[in-house]
Amino acid sequence: MKAKARKTQGGWQVEAPALPGFGDGEELEVLYLREGLLMLARPGILEEMKEKGQKEAGPQEKRKESPAAGAPAAAASSSPSPTKPRILSSTEAALVRRLTAIRFEERTVPSVAKKISVLEKKMLDGLVGRRLIEVFKNPKYKEGVYNISRELFNAVSMPEEEEKGAHAGGSGQAGAESGAAEKEKNRMGVAEKENGITKAAARTDIPFPVPTSRVSFQSQDAKVPLNSPLHLAKFGYMVLDSENEARAVMEGVKDVQKSDPVKGVRGFDRKYYVLRRSFMAQNQAKMLQRLEQGDANAETVSKDTGLSPTAVQVLLMILADDGEVLEKKRGMWGRA
């Protein structure tokens, strides 16, 4: 079947022979698969196909997707999760990256409309329709502000070599506006604890913090590994590289927790950031005071506070989880 594309004042008009399954004047979704390749779809058809696939997969597939018992990872929400970006074109990804570069409070609907083309606006509306991007409204944002889902943020933030694996495994995202979304919406819910690491019991469309400032993680003492309970006990924090490591190491932290509670969060770089409450109490005020003076990256905060860049990154992750700070653009942190 051949069709003709004609340029109009507002974009492009496609003329094609009668299409079975489509009504006269019906609005269609246009999916950009890659350069020069589009797919027309009736609104809602992708969701229907996804639901049908889940029913046919049966309980065995569901068991594969369930997190292992006792794993200190972000738990699946009981709320229906939005459509995951399994089909995300390079054009759509580029548009989302542009949005993530805009500060949350400046990402209002009227402001964004001035910065993108008519075609990009239609593409953005499609992402909203697929519930990958939400238009959030409250008294402060009466005309709406775009909030990017954690799945979508993760899909466009991770390196390309990891993206395929994440799409296959269904991993989630941390959002640049983690703290802002939590403060504005107050919908994070209650967090459960497992071995002192936050296990998120939250809606799936609220982003979690993800470090993108490329801090090189280093132990404060070359003789004490950064991922050891000894580093936590001696310096007040540690960084763990994987879920298996977190499960093993946190067993050895129980003695520390008796006298000094431990808090940890999982970033979607798959690392676990853990600190002692006493370390946080000792350094939180100067961290926040520095960020009140203006946005800064971890290295700058490190120089101004006297803390190591790794210690700063751990504190930023915990403070972001608490809604105190947020990564306003790549690598730049500020008060929420």
Image (cartoon, grey):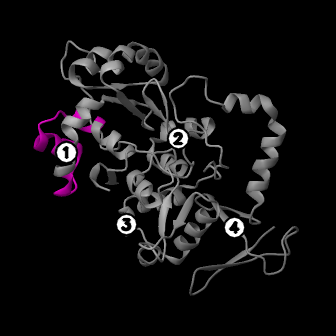
**Residue hosting label 3:** 105
Residue 139, given in percent of the width and then of the height, sits at 45, 74
Q: Is residue 306 magenta?
A: yes
For residue 163, which numbered disc appears in the image? 2
Q: Earlier in the sequence, mark 1 or mark 3?
A: 3
Q: Earlier in the sequence, mark 4 or mark 3?
A: 4
Give the distance between the C-alpha atoms of the residues marked 4 and 3, in whole angstroms.
29 Å
Q: Earlier in the sequence, mark 1 or mark 2?
A: 2
Q: Amino acid at mark 2?
A: Glu
Q: Nearer the viewer, residue 130 or 234?
A: 234
Mark 4 vs mark 3, foreground winner is 3
Q: Earlier in the sequence, mark 2 or mark 3?
A: 3
Residue 263, given in percent of the width and then of the height, sits at 37, 31
The part of the chain drawn in magenta is 291-314
Q: Amino acid at mark 1?
A: Ala
**Residue hosting label 4:** 29
Q: Are marks 2 and 3 in contact (CB under 8 Å)?
A: no
- The quadrant the N terminus occupies is bottom right
Residue 123, given in percent of the width and then of the height, sits at 57, 67
Give the distance between the C-alpha atoms of the residues marked 2 and 3, in whole angstroms.
28 Å
Q: Amino acid at mark 3?
A: Glu
Where 277 sits versus 54, above or below? Answer: above
For residue 285, which numbered disc appears in the image? 1
Residue at 82% of width from left, 47% of height from top? 52
Residue at 28% of width from left, 38% of height from top? 315
Give the distance between the C-alpha atoms of the residues marked 1 and 2, in whole angstroms.
37 Å
Where 203 sits versus 8, above or below? Answer: above
Check disc 3: other Cα within 10 Å, few if <14, some if 14-19, many if 20+.
some
Give the distance between the C-alpha atoms of the residues marked 4 and 1, in whole angstroms.
49 Å
Q: Secondary structure at mark 1?
A: helix
Q: Is residue 65 magenta?
A: no
- The quadrant the C terminus occupies is bottom left
